[in-house]
Amino acid sequence: MAGVTLDTGVFIALERRQRRAIALWEKWALARTILTVPAVVIAEWWRDRQWDAARWLAGVEVEPVDEELARVAGEVLGELRLGREHTIDAIVMASAAQRGDTLYTSDFDDMARLTTRFPGVRVLGV
């Protein structure tokens, strides 16, 4: 299985113990899938969490947002005339695109708009 990039909605679904999210997590663990999450996703998701919320990050590679990734995301926002409220989505999509990952999201419609600029990224719902 190729790598997988996760957005904020995946972590929220895991916290809520949604069946599909748990099943996907177990599948990824069995397949030893490389899971990546841009650091901004953690900032969007993390609040005053219980100790068990951090366990979802244990098997995940946290990707820092460097200048190149930030510029790509910003350019896409400009090209598609999307507002700043889509910044994290654009970063997550650009992150997945640079590795050729599949992107899992709970925000399918917004991410689907970004695939016009990143046609190689497969977007799936959680």
Image (tube, helix red, strand yellow):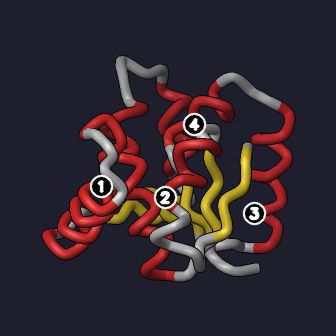
Q: Label 1 to label 3, Cα distance in Å? A: 31 Å
Distance from disc 3 to disc 4, alpha carbons, whole Å, reads: 17 Å
Residue at the image point whose x is 42% and y is 32% from the top: 45
The residue at which mark 4 appears reads as 9
Q: Residues within 10 Å of mark 1 (few under 14, many from 20)?
A: many
Q: Secondary structure at mark 1?
A: helix
Inter-mark Cα distance, 2 to 3: 25 Å
Distance between the alpha carbons at the discs numbered 4 and 2: 17 Å
Going by the image, does 62 lie left or right of 21?
left
Q: Is residue 73 above or below residue 12?
A: below
User: Mark 3 or mark 4: which comes first in sequence?
Assistant: 4
**Residue 98 lies in quadrant:** bottom left
Alpha-carbon span between mark 1 and mark 4: 20 Å
**Residue at 14% of width from left, 70% of height from top?**
67
User: Going from the N terminus, do you reach mark 1 or mark 4 first?
Assistant: 4
Nearest the viewer among 84 and 66 is 84
| Residue 94 falls in image quadrant | bottom left
Query: Residue under circle 2?
Result: 114
- Marks 3, 4: nearer the viewer: 4
What amino acid is at disc 1? Leu
Would you place residue 75 above or below residue 55 in this image?
below
On the image, the x and y values in percent for residue 3 come to 62, 75
Numbered disc total: 4
Q: Which residue is mark 1?
A: 77
Marker disc for residue 28: 3
Give coordinates of residue 70: x percent, y percent.
21, 63
Residues under numbered marks 2 and 3 in contact, where contact means CB atoms less than 8 Å apart: no
Q: Earlier in the sequence, mark 4 or mark 2?
A: 4
